Amino acid sequence: MKGKVKKTEKVANGMFMLQFEAPQGFNVRPGQFVSILCPDLTLRRPFSCADFEDGAVTVLFKLKGKGTSFLAGLQPGDEIDFVGPLGNGFDISDKHALVIGAGVGIAPVYFLNKFLKQSHFVGAFKSEDEVPKDFEPDEVIIGGTILDHLERLIAEHKPEIIHACGPSVVLRAITRCGVTSQIAMEKVMACGIGVCKGCVIKLNRGGVVQNATICHDGPVFDGGEVVWE
Amino acid sequence: MTVDLRVDLNGLTLQNPIIAASGTYGYDDEFSVFCDVNKLGAVVTKAITIEPRPGNEGARIFETCCGMINRIGLENMGITEFISSRTAKNGAAVQIVNIAGSTLDEYVQLAKICDGKVGAIELNLSCPNVAHGCLEFGTDEKALYEVVSAARAEFSGHITAKLTPNVTSIEKIAVAAQKAGANAVSAINTVKGLGIKINPDFTKEIVRGGLSGRAIKPVALGAVERIAQSVDIPVIGMGGIYTLDDVLEFFAVGADAVQIGTANFTHPDICEKLADDLAKFMEDNGFKTLDELKARLR
Ligand SMILES: Cc1cc2nc3c(=O)[nH]c(=O)nc-3n(C[C@H](O)[C@H](O)[C@H](O)COP(=O)(O)OP(=O)(O)OC[C@H]3O[C@@H](n4cnc5c(N)ncnc54)[C@H](O)[C@@H]3O)c2cc1C
Ligand SMILES: Cc1cc2nc3c(=O)[nH]c(=O)nc-3n(C[C@H](O)[C@H](O)[C@H](O)COP(=O)(O)O)c2cc1C
Ligand code: FES
């Protein structure tokens, strides 16, 4: 699928946003992702959708290596080759939700939060200059880890569900805090559609441990089911 | 002018020589979300074993310069579920079932179960032979001969022996496969390798597995040439094919058909595109049949 770049912009230290027009009829739910072709790389690069409005997809990304450097250098009007939407997406409900994004993990939950009626949206960042412009959450936590605040956040907001994305240490702790959770996971991907079995994790479903692909069965999983490596 | 892309692989005729490689295309029509799978010559399934397998623990994929290393570990649904739910779903694209065993007996059982149920199998001979110090079947002429002839005795359809490049003399192995009654040989499977990333804090990420993609094309071309010079049965070439030029290069060194693996991940419609590109190239250059084109290339 071809996308036409509308803009790229630096939104925080080491973080960029890319907005591109998707073909007519494209649609995406929060938690789903797109996989973008980057020149000279064997594997496409997956990125969560951080927004979708008027046919334009927004992704928010952290500068890491070749792929993300290529994206950061795109100019308005450039064409990109992407596949998507991939993956399952978050459940959207009327439950009292605590929404947590750590670092660039803010991307999918920012999009999700727009669909939630009762939520408190928290973003956790290493430093002030890493908070992405225009993607500000209700509450910003700087330094330390979100885990230092989890107990307080739960006491204050009494969530029925936590939706989260971020590093696996954070996600793992969230799945153990006693509140039902839905978390968006990551792993290096090849096919992106569940056939190569390159991105599997283990789930415990009713006492039976089984494999699930992050790209196709996820990337969003019920926190309680994930078996951590 | 219409061109005839059909290829006869010694008992199996495909509508064209473009085949999706095992492990990169699912079981049958998964890629139909990206392209018309029925425009391919064939789809090889991911490797199927007697029992379902969960695959390896830990990181399974490592991207390298011009390629990737995988250690999926044969995760699959097992032959019983496969036969009951996933055979013959495609139309014009032939389904070739890739089978893998840990013992001679497992290959025999698999061949027996497939007999009459599927038309073509590809023996994945890059599997560790548990009874013989886990040396891969395909690295030993004798072990390979035993597996192929045992499968031949049980399976009446078309058999392709898929060879590993991790040997001193792949042509000798190919000759053993021919003697044992394989209808065709395919090569190459992945090249043994290691990917390592040293993090700033000196922790390391290491993935030991099979290298595929552009990086292995010269290895594959070399292997295919040596095999084609040594056997009379058809040779199916693969390893790093991304473009029509790559396909022509494989034909030039003796391949009768080609498989496309890793490229499907980057360009999910590439197999359909290569089939179209090949037809157009033949039309533009006045080749009516594949044999005419191959003769010109060789
Ligand atoms: C479902 C999913 C959603 C993601 N969403 C976002 C997002 O919204 N924003 C964001 O900044 N990042 C996201 N990522 C991570 C992002 O894909 C990687 O940071 C990116 O691929 C790095 O590419 P690079 O070439 O710049 O860096 P490299 O130097 O090639 O890689 C840096 C690290 O990125 C990871 N990575 C590399 N290749 C892949 C691949 N093919 N698939 C997955 N991970 C890979 C590896 O962990 C690697 O160590 C997501 C990953 C997944 C799986
Ligand atoms: C992720 C992955 C999984 C694979 N799984 C199998 C398999 O199950 N059986 C098999 O015979 N070959 C398997 N292969 C090997 C390919 O079929 C092919 O031989 C090899 O990748 C070389 O071709 P390529 O460079 O076009 O990928 C796999 C390759 C990859 C990349
Ligand atoms: S990337 Fe292939 S199964 Fe997920």
Image (cartoon, coloured by chain):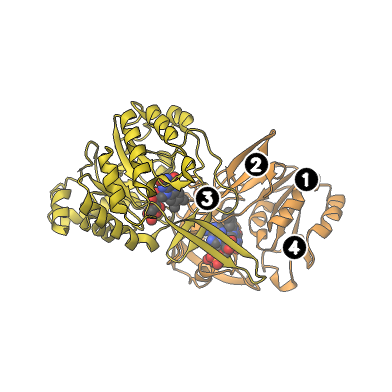
Chain colours: A orange, B yellow
- The residue identified by callout 3 is A198
Tag 1 or tag 4, which sits nearer the N-term? 1
Same chain? Circles 4 and 3: yes
Same chain? Circles 2 and 1: yes
In which quadrant of the rendered view does residue B220 lie? bottom left
Q: Quadrant of the C terminus of chain B?
A: bottom left
**Which amino acid lies under the numbered mark 3 shown in the image of this protein?**
Gly
Q: Percent x, y for residue A100?
A: 73, 55
Q: CA distance from mark 2 to mark 4?
A: 27 Å
Tag 3 or tag 1, which sits nearer the N-term? 1
**Which amino acid lies under the numbered mark 2 shown in the image of this protein?**
Leu
Give whichever of B99, B103 is nearer the camera: B103
Q: Is residue A16 visible?
A: yes
Q: Is mark 2 within 8 Å of ligand 3?
A: no
- The residue identified by callout 2 is A203
Give whichever of B24, A61 is nearer the camera: B24
Same chain? Circles 2 and 4: yes
Q: CA distance from mark 1 to mark 3?
A: 35 Å
Q: Nearer the viewer, mark 4 or mark 3?
A: 3
Query: Which residue is found at the position 78% from the left and 67% from the top?
Result: A142
**Which amino acid lies under the numbered mark 1 shown in the image of this protein?**
His
Q: CA distance from mark 2 to mark 1?
A: 25 Å
Q: Percent x, y for residue B280?
A: 21, 54
- Label 1: how many Cα within 10 Å (few below 14, some 14–19, many 20+): some
Left or right of residue B222, residue A51 in this image: right
Same chain? Circles 4 and 1: yes
